[in-house]
Amino acid sequence: MNIEMIRAAAQRLAGHARRTPILTSPFLDAIAGRRVFVKAECLQHTGSFKFRGGWSAVSALPPAALQKGVIAFSSGNHAQGVALAARSHGAPAVIIMPADAPAVKIANTRALGAEVVLYDRATEDRDEIGDRLAAARGLTLIKPFDEPLVIAGQGTCGLEIAAEMTALGVTRADVMVCCGGGGLTSGIALALAADAPGLRARPIEPEGFDDATRSLASGRIERNARLSGSLCDAIITPQPGNLTFPIMQDHCGPGVVVTEDQALQAMALAFDRLKIVLEPGGAVALAAALFHPDASEGDAVIAVATGGNVDPATFAKALA
Amino acid sequence: MNIEMIRAAAQRLAGHARRTPILTSPFLDAIAGRRVFVKAECLQHTGSFKFRGGWSAVSALPPAALQKGVIAFSSGNHAQGVALAARSHGAPAVIIMPADAPAVKIANTRALGAEVVLYDRATEDRDEIGDRLAAARGLTLIKPFDEPLVIAGQGTCGLEIAAEMTALGVTRADVMVCCGGGGLTSGIALALAADAPGLRARPIEPEGFDDATRSLASGRIERNARLSGSLCDAIITPQPGNLTFPIMQDHCGPGVVVTEDQALQAMALAFDRLKIVLEPGGAVALAAALFHPDASEGDAVIAVATGGNVDPATFAKALA
């Protein structure tokens, strides 16, 4: 995994992924006590940065593999990113989802052209189903984060941050990144190390699901006690990846942990001051930038707002 | 009023106004039956396109006038646009607002550095107050739409649409524009006529406040029967401007009228599919693009999403 893979992914994504804007508001600056720059990745195709990794992986496949298609396990943003990337390449996509996933997510993934295969969490083994389908049809598995092509795709977000902050003259600052398995965090960290070494990626996690933060502190991969039960469902993973963790160790600053209430407050401020829609897991980086000013130094902070796929009821809760 | 004034405004706005993104979603394309391109002007500074006109007018003032300051009548988006533009130029700003304006709007305008002067709608004459203050302090009045420098500023949005749609190969399409007094509509229409003559601006209005639509149909300025009582408060004006109407006559296609329910539905779809926050008046153009497909021809339509300054209760109503 190296910077050249990220630059190659950027070439493949050019003209297909959106170069998302960096937004600001004097009201957010006042809360944080420094300038706040928000990379609005919720405006990416399919509503999250996951499209970058999906496109990177699908676009790198040789024609024969593309023709057979791809497969992914996901109930959320990765599913939609892979599905749209595959459809755009004319490749079949199979997405394995739990049968109790929200109906709207199943419908959205199908509407993006994917074949959705449902399994029963209680009685079926999703890996077994996936292996069987992949073997039978020759499908290529696209893992959500511990996969070099996916990390490279997410890293293109870091190249954009490096270029834009350099142009703005911001050369020393922390870059808060919502962190699940660490694909985005490690990709951004590699890109910043190469193109803007004064900018430092920081993994941001919700309370109770701070595996990356604890792993960076202890120096070895730590696991979360719980595997569900957070509003920030998009970034709940058992532990950092075997590929992503060493990259984070080499290039990231310490993690920051925020509460669910802080994530909801950040969603409300993004609504009010930036006019963007964030999901709870996509708002934790902004929450860290706004509500944990002591966690970083300097006169600027960058927050990557990673996704906006939230149901109306949860959004209304954040605004209330 | 001519294209050179818009190009000059674009020079003054460069590096200060945001070049807002054009967003898309395959789900919106499916609803409209053609490709839908949404110019997300809600992501402009202060949450609406009004910052463009404010900046254009303030930045054109000679130093002596800047030092004395500016004055505007507004309870909404124009106030915030002018206030932030003035503060950025180090110019005092006085905003005359009705005392019964929402407290949050008054607070926001003050937070942007403006002096807010409140008046009682029932007993006081706002023009008299404004004239007196302007004369006493030598303030320059910045009108909300019927002012060449303001139209020129709003027109920069049209230059960006022309450039980006030309780059995408979309050379014939209607550009739906949320229309109040016609500053944005006429500015965009002039810009398109110069830089992308196959694109045509269309004023979009809410039911009951369709003065521009009726005026274009009859060939003379028509007035609305009511002056309040619409959810789309940002675009409720008594009639088209004396400057903006002739420009619209020369360059715009017929108006389209949408219902409040359609505006709310467009807000919900912008939330769900684009991850942007729109206010009702900022969503009528998208509503026309999505729900009035027979109003235009061709395989593409552009909608200008003009603003996102909406209170949580109204937003929750749209999502419900």
Image: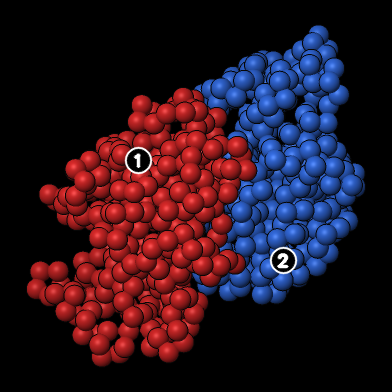
Chain colours: A blue, B red
For the point 25% across and 55% down, the residue is B240
Q: Quadrant of residue A143?
A: top right
Amino acid at dot 2: Ala
Q: Position of residue B291 (x, y in %)?
A: 36, 30
Q: Where is the N terminus of chain B found, in terms of image quarters?
A: bottom left
User: Please, is residue B116 above or below residue A227 in the view?
Assistant: below
Does residue A228 lie above or below B34 as drawn? below
Chain holding disc 1: B
Residue type marked 1? Gly
Q: Is residue A224 left or right of residue B149?
A: right
Q: Are marks 2 and 1 on the same chain?
A: no
Q: Residue at x 59, y 67 (%)?
A: B15
Is residue B40 at least partly visible in the picture?
A: no
Vertical order, A312 against A259 (above or below): above
Depth order, front residue of A266/B274: B274
Along the horizontal axis of the image, is B306 left or right of B147?
A: right
Question: Mark 2 highlights which residue?
Answer: A167
Task: Using the image, name the chain to which the residue with label 2 belongs.
Answer: A
Taking the spot 71% from the left edge, 20% from the top edge, the residue there is A90
- Numbered label attached to residue B84: none
Q: Secondary structure at mark 2?
A: helix
Distance CA(mark 2)–CA(mark 1): 40 Å
Q: Which mark is residue B253?
A: 1
Could you say where residue B269 lies in the image, as x and y percent from the top left?
44, 36
Query: Which of A53/B9 is in front?
Result: B9
Viewer-proximal residue, A81 or A269? A81
